[in-house]
């Protein structure tokens, strides 16, 4: 059983290194972090710069930080959202850059 645990830890370590060598897309709220799934486990990364807000292409670092490389394009965002369930909403009220809504 100890061998199995070492194998799992080694696999997760390899995947974390692979993630650090790749770019990934995520929605980011100012001051918030992003979550990335690795083999069913969720890793949380703080975003640098912390003031960034929007859809970003990021690269994770070993210290738990994801660097914003650039803002994501519309085609990239659409590809990210395509497999997710769709819900119709009625936008009711705007407060700055945020909207309140209700299900249609």
Image (cartoon, helix red, strand yellow):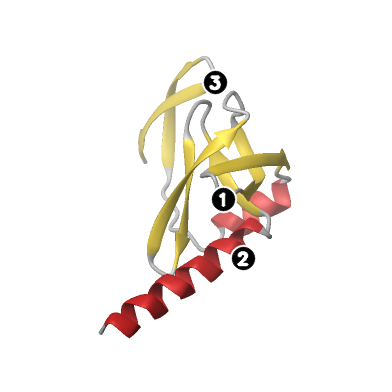
Q: Could you give the CA–CA distance between mark 3 and mark 2, rounded to whole angstroms?
A: 35 Å
Give left or right: position of 29 versus 17: left
For marks 1 and 3, the one nearer the N-term is: 1
Image quadrant where one finds the C terminus: top left
Marks 1,2: beta carbons within 8 A: no
Where is 67 relative to 25, above or below? above
Q: Could you give the CA–CA distance between mark 1 and mark 2, rounded to whole angstroms?
A: 11 Å
The residue that disc 2 covers is 18
Rendered location of residue 87, percent (x, y): 41, 49
Q: Could you give the CA–CA distance between mark 1 and mark 3, rounded to whole angstroms?
A: 32 Å
For marks 1 and 2, the one nearer the N-term is: 2
Helix, strand or loop at disc 3?
A: loop
Return the residue nearer the eye: 30 or 60. 60
Residue 92: mark in rendering: none
**Residue at 48% over, 38% down:** 33
Residue 62: mark in rendering: 1
Q: Residue furthest front?
A: 2
Report which quarter residue 88 is drawn in: top left
Where is 19 relative to 45, above or below? below
Characterize the local packing of mark 3: few (<14), some (14-19) or many (20 or more) Cα atoms within 10 angstroms.
Answer: few
Marks 3,2: beta carbons within 8 A: no
Image quadrant where one finds the N terminus: bottom left
Characterize the local packing of mark 2: few (<14), some (14-19) or many (20 or more) Cα atoms within 10 angstroms.
Answer: few
Q: Nearer the viewer, mark 1 or mark 3?
A: 1
Marks 1,3: beta carbons within 8 A: no
**Residue at 38% over, 67% down:** 40
The residue that disc 3 covers is 97
């Amino acid at each position: 059983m100890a061998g199995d645990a070492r194998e799992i830890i080694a696999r997760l370590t390899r995947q974390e290194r692979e993630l650090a060598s790749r770019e990934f897309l995520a929605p980011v709220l100012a001051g918030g972090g992003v979550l990335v799934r690795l083999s069913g486990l969720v890793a949380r990364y703080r975003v640098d710069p912390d003031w960034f807000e929007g859809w970003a292409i990021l690269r994770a670092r070993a210290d738990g930080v994801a660097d914003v490389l650039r803002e994501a394009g519309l085609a990239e965002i659409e590809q990210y959202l395509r497999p997710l369930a769709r819900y119709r909403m009625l936008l009711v009220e705007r407060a700055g850059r945020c909207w309140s809504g209700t299900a249609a």
